Amino acid sequence: MTGWEMVVGLEVHVQLKTRTKMFCGCENRFGAPPNSLVCPVCAGMPGSLPTVNRKAVELGMMTGIALGCRIASRTMFDRKNYFYPDLPKGYQISQFDRPLASGGSFRFPFGGGSMEASITRAHLEEDSGKNVHDASTDGSFVDLNRAGVPLIEIVTGPVFRSAREVSAYLAALKQLLQYIGASDCNMERGSLRCEPNVSVRKAGSTSLGTKTEIKNINSFKSVEKALEYEFRRQTEALESGGRILQQTMLWDDVAGSTAPMRSKEEAHDYRYFPEPDIPPLEIAADWVERVRASMPELPDARKRRFVESFGLREYDAAVLTASRDFSSLFEECARLWPNRRRLCSLFITDLLSILADEKIEVCDSRLSAQSVASLLRMEEEGAVGKNQVREILAELAKAGGDPPAIAASRGMVQLRDEDEIGALVTKAIAESPESVADFRAGRGKRAIGFLMGNVVRAMNGKGDPKIIRRLLVEKLENQSRS
Amino acid sequence: MDSVRMTAARAAGLIRSGDLKSAEYLDAFLKAISDREREVGAFLTIDRAAAMRAAEETDRSASAGKARGRLCGVPVAVKDNICTAGMRTTCGSRILENFIPFYDAHVVKRIREEGGIVLGKTNMDEFAMGSSTENSALGVTRNPRDLSRVPGGSSGGSAAAVAAGMAPLALGSETGGSVRQPASLCGVVGLKPTYGRVSRYGLVAFASSLDQIGPLAACVEDAALLLGVTAGRDSKDSTSSEEEVPDYAASLDDPICGLRLGVPREYLGECLKGDGRDSFDRAVGLFRDMGAEIVDVSLPHTRYVISTYCIIATAEASSNLARYDGMRYGLRTGEDDLEDLVSSSRTDGFGPEVKRRIILGTFVLGSGYYDAFYLKARKARTLIREDFSKAFGESRLDAMLTPASPVPAFRFGEKAGNPLEMYLCDVFTAAVNLAGNCAISVPSFPAPASPPLPLGLQIIGDAFREQVILRIARAFEKAMEAKS
């Protein structure tokens, strides 16, 4: 299928991380028992009225600012009318022609360089509840805990030409929104939902083909798969002389394919009109400035700062700043531990894979800067070796605790038997005459470093480095004298 | 003491000081209910026992010197579209026939905080859609002045309860005249506050940008009392105003000599004939006698009022009534599938007038019709609003005088077959809802009949100038008393 080009624009819905819902005082929290976070307003009881959550507006403003958008000086809410059991009022409060933010652009890393996505608009709205189908009773239920959770919908222009570009954009968007604290962007939990508009055209063409919208993509991994599938489906249809219908496709993760939504379900006339229960929101310039001033450091700025003030390599700084929590923890540790090189390798080589293996989010881990520093101090003093450092670090991430206590409880006692260590030291020196030559030639540091490594390895990291070093120096000096 | 004829303001003071028992005062109204409710049918729900318990509790507080509140021990009838915790709130509809809210509307909370007692819930046109209370799915309300006639609507139950002496005070709600018109037809005082003056939290929405809760009472002083209790900012209603609430009683008896009162010439056209015209002319004459300056003014967009009102009110209603889908509360019929459940619940639950308006409202918002209807109506609304602000501003008016309704109470069924004619009952009142300012209907010269049929005079004020129209209404009321 060469000669065809994919064109994608994205609508991304992100749940904003507020304490309370968009239009009422109910808690905004995932995972509570069904219908336990509900009040007359979010349940759409007769007579209830919405009031705007100021914090949600501010997070929306931050999002807009971070995406280079203009913040409207006057923004309005509108009603989007349709019937569905998970929509308690029979309409969703959204924004139609006066969105909070518009006209932005967002530069994100892609393929060693970077690319830019135009942001058409970002607007606020409320989430719906959830329909729950219970197979055991064959019953359908509605859980309204999610109803009224604040959402921001971020819409790009048709700027993406491949599924990989879309993935890169989503990863960068997620990073950005996590940094500014707007959302935790957890696709599996539905706090980030992505609905691509996909069309194809002949390479070189400048006009746009007929697009389809893909819904029901539930993980970052599925995004590329769904796009590739839909691209193939459309090009095959066109190549075999068919045409593309403008319709909504549902992604089936198990089957790995898309299928059209029943046309009845999408034949909506939403009858948008201005929400009479909420007066237009005037956003004074100084409010925007206050929000801008209160914005946390963005990922790019933090990366640059890590390079400049910690002397890290560009690549390492990028890895460390991939997530805000991870980089914040690094920064706290760096304040307590001056050897940034070692800290950097501990974070990148050990901690990242521990978190991935154990499926722990940094914010959920029990790590503290104090415990990491204490661990590195033990290492420096020779109380533990590198493998043990990693083992203790994993324990700290999972359960927290005090590194010396963990070491003691796990019997990580350093071997201090000088006869045993002495024998290995003698053996190592005998096996490496060039080290002895180095030592004699005044390159002691290099010789000791090399021999230390061999002895430590021979002892599986369990030998006390201080004793090994002392014995090495003693024996090398003896040999040089003789 | 004749409790029923004493003002509620006075009664509250006497109950606070222990000079009148709340239980005794309440009993006078319960007696009136026993005597007249069967024929009038003002109420959908009455909780005598709960009201009596509250009254006795008030009396105990009073004897301990602890009774408080501007409505201390005074019963209030509440229109059945205003939520009352633990007391069913039906909106006169089958679809909410058994709906019991677990929260009080802001106004109900305020009434209770000021020592008032919720006596019961009054009948109304279904979802406040109508001008005769004939659209209630749950009962018939008759005009206490002439039982063969309608009480007006949609707050017909509240107006009838006050007119029949079954409650000293009542709350109604307005969208296009639903307090003033039944007040006019029943011969009581009814006030539509400025949009935003009274919180709508807990008022079941009909048309959110027009709805406003207003007091009905036998006299101006009591209407002022209930307005004062219910008015003010409520953080739960974003459209409620921060504007300070004045002491309405304080300036009630100030003279009105020299006030400039406009008479909009467009209101004196062909829709005002016969008895209605005579009554209005005499009322204007009375104001001249009192030394007010009568000024001819123009509200040039008046002829667009009814169509503008119909489009905006039905558009908002079509959305506001979408929540009655049989899912969470209210009537549920049909279980075959989702669509059956929703459509059959709504088909069985809503009456014909409500359906008519939902269909009309859905149509005017539909793609392809939005610009021609809804958008144009919003523009017309702006022009209508500007008519008022120009009249008050350029003509330096203190208020305007118009009839509250073109005709006195009509007979049952007289207009029920012709929705358009029924909509024209709102011709003098709906403009004020569109413009958002305030107006009061106060009993004026009745239409000659046997018995005479009440007619109201409407006094329209600028936004948040309720104290001005109350003062003018009070002066008119006193002048009328002096006449009789």
Image (cartoon, coloured by chain):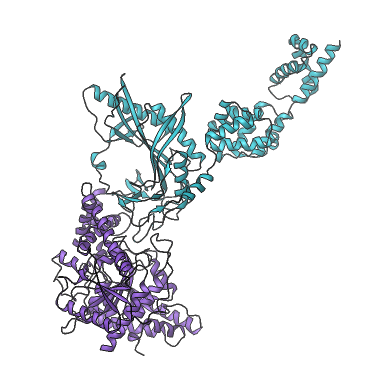
B270 left or right, relative to A476: left
Which of the pair B84/A253 is nearer the observer? B84
- Name the residue at the bottom extreme: B1
Residue at the image point whose x is 63% and y is 28% from the top = A311
The answer to whether residue A336 is left or right of residue B423 is right
Side (left or right) of B333 relative to B197: left
Q: Look at the image and tell me in which quarter the N terminus of chain A lies.
A: top left
The x and y percentages for residue A445 are 75, 18
Where is residue A249? Give x, y as percent. Answer: 29, 34
Between A85 and A177, the one lying in front of the other is: A177
Q: In this view, does B110 lie above or below B287?
A: above
What shade has chain B been given? purple
Q: In which quarter of the image is residue A42?
A: bottom left
Q: Can residue A405 be seen in this view?
A: yes
Q: Nearer the viewer, residue B354 or A68?
A: A68
Rendered-image quadrant of the C terminus of chain A? top right
Is residue A298 depicted above or below B239 in this figure?
A: above
Q: In this view, does B414 lie above or below A468?
A: below
Quadrant in the picture for residue B30:
bottom left
Q: Position of residue A41 (x, y in %)?
A: 39, 57
Where A430 sits versus B304, above or below? above
Q: Which residue is drawn at 74% across and 10% down?
A: A431
Percent coordinates x, y for residue B263 in the rendering: 24, 73
Q: Colour in which chain A is shown?
A: cyan
Note whether residue B96 is visible: no
Q: In the figure, is residue A427 to the left or right of A354?
A: right
